Image: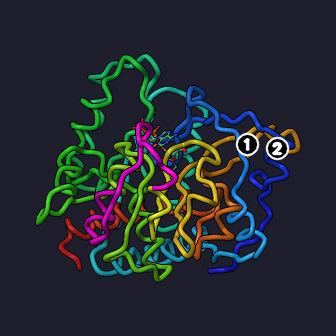
């Protein structure tokens, strides 16, 4: 882990008052980001306590948990395992991706997943269905892949067009090939003691992997997860609990989120609200995993916006002992975990350890 730099200045006390950014959430992907313009913006406009200001001025600096390099390391490991698998059995893992419609963002995510597959030796198969296809057509594609022994993982790119019932679609993916980990049976097993899910959703799995690979002890620690969505917050809380942390979930109805979060040795934030978690929310020495990916307007960027997390990075890195940046933290782990789930699936079928 490298030391955090203080290049992000949006949350600094001076820029907080000087420059109020109209914040918005962009839409993302079931496994990458979630967008919606509907979420209320949270400007970084608030006075900070003198105690906190003193702490900031002490210029302590958290270690950066470098998701980009950890994800690369994982992809390299997967690549080696797949070569060995191919030599031993002649089989390589296969991932099927079903894309409905022509959303540009979804097309980009599918392209990125395909590229990542190719780089590690996973064969990828893509089905593109038109925006106005029927639910039955999507179900038929899934059924074909469910029955195809060369396919070890099936991923339905979300969001789906409104006329298609997402729950029906996700339920129809064989749990043995549910590499997104969204099937209710996999989530149910994750929640139950003494049961093992076949797959764990990629983003929360990536958060735990970042903690493990950064040497952060989870057992016996107090953890706070901000957010309780089916794809990130809820499974992240379940995973932390399985790791024997004592877990509290903060959501939009939680009273005193700042006070609760400040108790935590480990914070995983997945609210989708830019800069919501200020430095004063962080316990000194705590570890911060920032899942949020939020677009804030930035006239200086050629795109007109840039991506920030839920956590006010500059403040938090003066208080925390370790922190993930955005971008470059949890994001790269999501695809790495998808590849890892696909490899595990193939190994399960082939009875390999
Ligand atoms: P959802 O909108 O589905 O869930 C957000 C959760 O945060 C909800 O449980 C909501 O509470 C809670 N929340 C929202 N506002 C507040 C608030 N002010 N205080 C406390 N809790 C709040 O989002 P996702 O879980 O899909 O995604 C969360 C973030 O993670 C997004 O920024 C998304 O882009 C990002 N993401 C990043 C990924 C990556 O690979 N790095 C992958 C997936 C998502 P309630 O339940 O009460 O509404």
Question: Residue shown at 52%/71% (left/top)?
Answer: 286
Residue 303 seen by the camera: no
Give me the disc on residue 249.
Answer: none
How far apart are the alpha carbons under marks 2 and 1? 6 Å
Q: Position of residue 227 (x, y in %)?
A: 43, 46
Q: Which residue is mark 1?
A: 45
Q: Position of residue 228 (x, y in %)?
A: 37, 45
Nearer to us in this view, 217 or 338: 217
Question: Residue shown at 76%/71% (left/top)?
Answer: 5
Give me the disc on residue 17.
Answer: 2
Residue 168 appears left or right of 194: right
Q: Position of residue 224 (x, y in %)?
A: 41, 59
Nearer to us in this view, 221 or 348: 221
> Quick check: marks 2 and 1 in contact, CB under 8 Å?
yes
Residue 238 appears left or right of 264: left
The first of marks 2 and 1 along the sequence is 2
The correct choice, above or below, for 29 with respect to 323 in the image is above
For the C terminus, the quadrant is bottom left
Q: Residues within 10 Å of mark 2 (few under 14, many from 20)?
A: some
State the scheme by which the image is colored: rainbow
Residue 156 appears left or right of 36: left
Residue 230 seen by the camera: yes
Residue 349 appears left or right of 62: left
Furthest toward the left, the residue is 194
Nearer to us in this view, 137 or 337: 337
In the image, residue 253 lies in the stretch drawn in magenta = yes
The correct choice, above or below, for 252 with respect to 103 in the image is below
Looking at the rendering, the stretch of residues picked out in magenta corresponds to: 237-259
Q: Residues within 10 Å of mark 1 (few under 14, many from 20)?
A: some
């Amino acid at each position: 882990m490298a030391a955090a730099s203080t290049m992000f200045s949006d949350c600094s006390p001076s820029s907080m008052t000087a420059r109020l950014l109209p914040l918005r959430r962009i839409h993302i992907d079931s496994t990458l980001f979630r967008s919606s313009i509907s979420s209320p913006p949270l400007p970084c406009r608030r006075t900070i306590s003198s105690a906190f200001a003193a702490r900031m001025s002490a210029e302590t600096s958290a270690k950066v948990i470098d998701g980009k390099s950890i994800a690369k390391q994982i992809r390299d490991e997967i690549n080696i395992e797949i070569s060995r698998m191919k030599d031993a059995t002649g089989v390589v893992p296969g991932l099927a991706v079903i894309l409905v419609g022509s959303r540009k963002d979804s097309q980009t995510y599918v392209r990125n997943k395909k590229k990542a597959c190719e780089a590690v030796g996973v064969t990828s198969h893509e089905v593109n269905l038109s925006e106005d296809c029927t639910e039955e057509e999507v179900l038929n594609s899934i059924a074909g892949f469910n029955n195809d022994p060369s396919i070890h993982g099936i991923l339905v790119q979300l969001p789906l067009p409104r006329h298609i019932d997402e729950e029906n679609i996700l339920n129809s993916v064989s749990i043995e090939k549910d590499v997104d980990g969204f099937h209710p049976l996999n989530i149910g097993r994750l929640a139950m003691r003494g049961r093992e899910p076949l797959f764990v959703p990629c983003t929360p799995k990536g958060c735990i992997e970042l903690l493990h690979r950064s040497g952060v002890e989870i057992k016996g620690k107090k953890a706070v997860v901000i957010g309780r969505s089916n794809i990130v917050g809820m499974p992240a809380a379940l995973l932390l609990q399985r790791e024997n942390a004592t877990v509290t979930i903060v959501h939009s109805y939680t009273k005193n989120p700042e006070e609760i979060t400040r108790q935590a040795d480990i914070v995983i934030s997945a609210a989708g609200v830019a800069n919501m978690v200020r430095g004063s929310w962080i316990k000194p020495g705590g570890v911060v995993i920032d899942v949020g990916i939020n677009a804030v307007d930035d006239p200086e960027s050629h795109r007109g916006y840039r991506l920030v997390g839920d956590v006010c990075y500059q403040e938090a890195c003066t208080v925390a002992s370790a922190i993930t940046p955005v971008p470059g933290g949890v994001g790269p782990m999501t695809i790495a975990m998808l590849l890892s789930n696909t490899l595990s699936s193939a190994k399960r079928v082939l009875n390999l350890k």
